[in-house]
Image (spheres, rainbow, N blue to C red):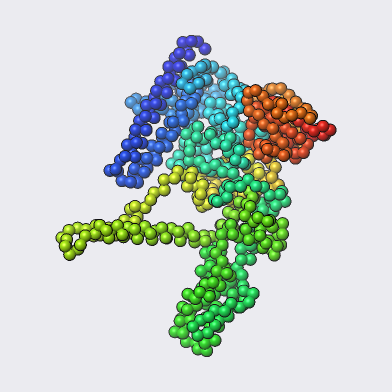
Amino acid sequence: MTTGELSAEQRRIAFLHDRLDRERAAAQAAFDAALKDGHEQRWHREVAVRTLSEQVSRLNVADENLCFGRIDTTDDRVYVGRVGLFDTENDYEPLLTDWRAPAARPFYTATAANPEGVTLRRHFRTKGRHLESFHDDELQLTSKALLDALNAPRSDTMRDIVATIQAEQDEVIRLPQRGVLVIEGGPGTGKTAVALHRVAYLLYTQRERLSRQGVLVVGPNPGFLRYIGEVLPSLGETDVVFATPGELFPGVRTQREDTPELQALKGGLAAVDLLVEAIADRQEVPAEPIPVELEDVTVPLTAEIAEQARERTRNAGLKHNEAQSVFHAALVDALVGPALDLIGEDWPELAADVRRELTGHPDVRRAVATLWPNLTAFGLLADLYDGRCFALGYPELHRDDPHAWTVSDVPLLDEAAELLGSDGAAERRAAEERRQAVEYAQGVLDVIDTDQVMHEDELRAVDLVDAEWLADRHTALDHRVLAERAAVDREWTYGHVVVDEAQELSEMDWRVLSRRSPNRSMTIVGDLAQRQAEAGVRDWRRVLAPLARDRWEYRRLTVNYRTPAEIMAYAAATLAEVDPTAVAPTSVRHGEPPLEVTGADPESFRPTRGTFAVISPDGPLTPRASKGLEFDTVVVVDPERMTPAERYVALTRATRRLVVLREVGADNVT
């Protein structure tokens, strides 16, 4: 690296930052003008404002590490960075190529064996807008830029890896979207980062579709989501909803865990039959006849009559709440005959009168509400856990607080909502809001209307519009961003779904996700060797065959970029306990061997620099809560009290130093 070359590259990077500033100012000015534009049709303005807002957001996050590399070929030079910049006055000549563009791919994939036409690959190290240094690699599989990034101290949040994506990872990131993609890899293989960068790549190549529906990212716990939460925004992508499995049903945010036995019961497909039973149990017949007092006679609504109506309603094949009106009609039909028998007359007009009286009778409506009640998912499960579980043969489901929702309850709530159908509350609310809007609009027209007699020749407002039109014209727009709207709508379907630590999900969890992604556009990330949940995945094919049929493919990452080889060798015995056939990923780095101690204070190993964690069966950071996280220094306390899968997770969180702390006299299980 010569001083002249460094100065030339500094000028180039300064030029790119200047171009970014100008584009950002132009986009902001256009955005401000669109907000003030009162001449354009409203929907045109809304589209312009949204498009420009997204453009401004993407440009605002591009400053840091704007340009991180360059590749030269025999006839071209390409600078690679976070966003694409073009010379609009020179036929849109590329000034900076977006890392996701096809032209940037050789930056990640070219090797000495397959250079792909690349004669030079240069990596820039910048701080703000200043170029500190650069280096040219010889197209090695493991470059200096990668090792520098891996050896740098960790921060509290995951960083993007756009400057150091490796060929193995790049291939997965750019795979065509043909359904479900499973990315499996051991600790430190970068599978989470690959999945997130794949989302950014898909948003780049399929933005129109995905920006309408958004992307759902499901992670194992809130700490993990906080850790990865800055990666996509740093790449300019914001149409993303982050959620844990305990947050996939609107109105519930829980991390409370059931016992392994209850997780297995609630997580298996047999839970669907359990819910069907629970709903059928709420479709009742009266223990004693219910008197229906008509004008002339009192008709007993007996168990036989209710049973007849119930069977007819069930045969209709509708969801429970949607079938309530069918049950009402069937009950009326079944009561007409007994009512006519009591009256002692039977002629068509009388039968019609009796049917009419029964249909609107408060005793019949109360009976319908009791025998075939409108149910919510919350109410159904709460009643089940509060006591109905005993009669159904599931006493283990009983709990003192039936509303203390667990993570395993969330898929049951979602399944129950699907089986029950709408309870009509949303429709009634929308109808009432519409009625109020029309009533208000009519009031406005009444105020501005003029006297028709005094102004017979004048055109009045009411001659041009009515209250219905005026209410439509002034319907309030939903200004929430896509992520806010999607997160509270159970029926929202996403353009793409990412699931991390997917090996922990139960069969019922997968049913929830299939409803969120009916097009089966999904990226599944996991490692079967790290499975801790009793109801979790043991075989990808078994889970995905019914979900996606043949529209799924599998990729395995084999290189460990995080964990030094010495730590992986130490964890090998534990991996063999989990799965004797498993092969650990190959580490690209070396470091100090793990340290085993007894009876020490974990805090005594806290480094002066870098991140630090103590992982213990009792917490506060448990093996389950540490999944997907990484720290410079890790102290694992009492590994002998962990299951093999938990211990394997705990031992592989460190990027630099691992300390194993045992109680005095504890057996060595590693």
Q: Is 289 above or below relative to 145?
A: below
Numbered-mark total: 0
Q: Is residue 332 left or right of residue 141?
A: left
Q: Is residue 535 visible?
A: yes
Displayed quadrant of residue 244: top right
Name the residue furthest bottom. 344
Q: Is 205 above or below relative to 357?
A: above
Name the residue furthest top. 3
**Residue 503 percent across, percent down from the top left:** 65, 43
Look at 45% across and 81% down and name the residue there.
353
Q: Is residue 9 left or right of residue 507?
A: left
Choose between 669 and 88: the one closer to the eye: 669
**Residue 8 percent across, percent down from the top left:** 44, 14
Look at 48% across and 26% down and name the residue there.
64
Choose between 139 and 603: the one closer to the eye: 603
Look at 70% across and 52% down and name the residue there.
262
**Residue 198 percent across, percent down from the top left:** 54, 36
Q: Is 487 above or below relative to 435?
A: above
